[in-house]
């Protein structure tokens, strides 16, 4: 019989409400028992959506509860270190929203503590479970394009104004688009190609009054391979999500994974047979030659499922599987971000170290 793992969720803003609670409650074996929510609107939403959970105002109430084994943290980046540290010291496993931490020193501290406490520490790098990213992985493994020489990945939005009260747009450590959207793109690139030899970065503030970076372009240098990662807030006309170039052909993909919009619309993956399935109009296009045959057309997207991340954490806690998002991997993403800031300031290519 499967054991039940009780979960305490800290934070019920956009992240907790949209990305964590619906996925936690979609996994058989995970039970959302407590939610820390502070603002009146968030308390009301949590009470309405998850009446079986107790709504609390103090994270200590979760840390001090011996029945809770897993703590999910979805709070501003500046609180990641302190909350994760408190959870680990209380003997809890931790799922920490991305980005892992603000600095690699903070990441190292948490990793050492998790090892000392013999507890699982992982990071919500959900974009590994995007349908298009899974498609990209399959395509690279198939070698249909031959040796890969260039990869470009974008994560764009169009918001030509500053959102009032948004902590990500305040001049705080860990704010800005590189820590936010960049963490997704960097993690995906490292999953695909490993650690780069060197990094170039161009970080900009393009919107009037912006106090933190709202546009970036990173180049990750590998032997025989160039990886370009871009994001911006002033991209009204959609640009390709992925461009993959190989010796034998190319792959171009438009459109974002459908799961975020589905979650924002109140849908859940549990019991939803259409979950994570991209419309055919969004399938990527391939043009290549393989074994002397010229191939062109659409590549059907793989099925995405963010809930797989929480299923994996449950399996790791109960000894049924290996942890997918390892803290060392998430730490490397933070290191790339640190080096990107260094590259931008010093206006030079910096070696990965």
Image (cartoon, rainbow, N blue to C red):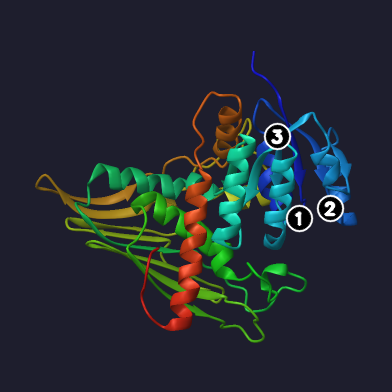
Above or below: residue 206 compared with residue 29: below
Q: Write the residue at 53% across / 23% down.
A: 320
Where does the image place residue 75, in percent across and percent down from the top left?
72, 55
Marks 2 and 3, the one that precedes in the sequence: 3
Where does the image place residue 76, in percent across and percent down from the top left?
71, 60
Q: Which residue is mark 3?
A: 25
* Separation of residues labelled 1 and 3 (CA atoms): 17 Å
Quarter where residue 13 is shown: bottom right
Assign a secondary structure to mark 1: loop
Where does the image place residue 272, in percent across and percent down from the top left?
61, 34
Assign a secondary structure to mark 3: loop
Q: Which residue is mark 1?
A: 13
Instruction: Give the position of the C terminus as an image quadrant.
Output: bottom left
Is residue 49 visible in this depiction of the protein? no
Q: Please name whichever residue, 267 or 1, is drawn nearer the observer in this view of the structure.
A: 1
Q: Write the residue at 64% across / 37% down.
A: 117
Q: Which residue is mark 2?
A: 42
Assign a secondary structure to mark 2: helix
- What crowding class fits label 2: few (fewer than 14 Cα within 10 Å), some (14-19), or many (20 or more)? some
* Separation of residues labelled 2 and 3 (CA atoms): 18 Å
């Amino acid at each position: 019989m499967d054991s039940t793992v009780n979960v305490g969720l800290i934070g019920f803003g956009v992240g907790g409400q949209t990305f964590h609670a619906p996925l936690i409650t979609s996994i058989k074996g995970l039970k959302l028992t407590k939610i820390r929510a502070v603002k009146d609107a968030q308390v009301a939403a949590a009470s309405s959506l998850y009446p079986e959970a107790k709504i609390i105002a103090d994270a200590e109430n979760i840390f001090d509860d011996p029945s809770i084994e897993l703590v999910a943290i979805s709070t501003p980046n500046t609180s990641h270190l302190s909350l994760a540290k408190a959870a680990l010291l209380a003997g809890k496993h931790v799922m920490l929203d991305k980005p892992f931490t603000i600095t690699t020193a903070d990441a190292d501290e948490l990793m050492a503590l998790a090892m000392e406490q013999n507890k699982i520490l992982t990071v919500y790098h959900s974009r590994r479970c995007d349908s298009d990213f899974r498609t990209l992985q399959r395509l690279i493994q198939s070698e249909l394009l031959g040796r890969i020489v260039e990869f470009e990945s974008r994560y764009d939005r169009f918001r030509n104004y500053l959102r009032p009260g948004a902590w990500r747009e305040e001049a705080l450590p860990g704010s800005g688009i590189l820590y936010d959207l960049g963490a997704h793109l960097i993690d995906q690139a490292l999953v695909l190609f490993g650690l780069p030899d060197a990094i170039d970065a161009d970080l900009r503030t393009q919107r009037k009054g912006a106090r933190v970076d709202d546009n970036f372009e990173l180049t990750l240098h590998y032997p025989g391979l160039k990886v370009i990662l871009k994001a911006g807030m002033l991209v009204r006309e959609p640009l390709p999500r992925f461009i993959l170039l190989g010796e034998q052909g190319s792959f171009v993909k438009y459109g974002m994974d459908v799961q975020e919009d589905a979650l924002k619309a109140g849908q859940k993956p549990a019991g939803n047979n259409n979950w994570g399935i991209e419309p055919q109009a969004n399938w990527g296009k391939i043009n290549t030659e393989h074994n002397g045959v010229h191939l062109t057309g659409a590549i059907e997207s793989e099925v995405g499922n963010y809930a797989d991340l929480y299923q994996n954490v449950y399996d790791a806690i109960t000894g049924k599987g290996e942890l997918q998002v390892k803290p060392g991997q998430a730490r490397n993403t933070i290191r790339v971000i640190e080096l990107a800031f260094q590259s931008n300031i010093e206006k030079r290519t910096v070696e990965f170290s």
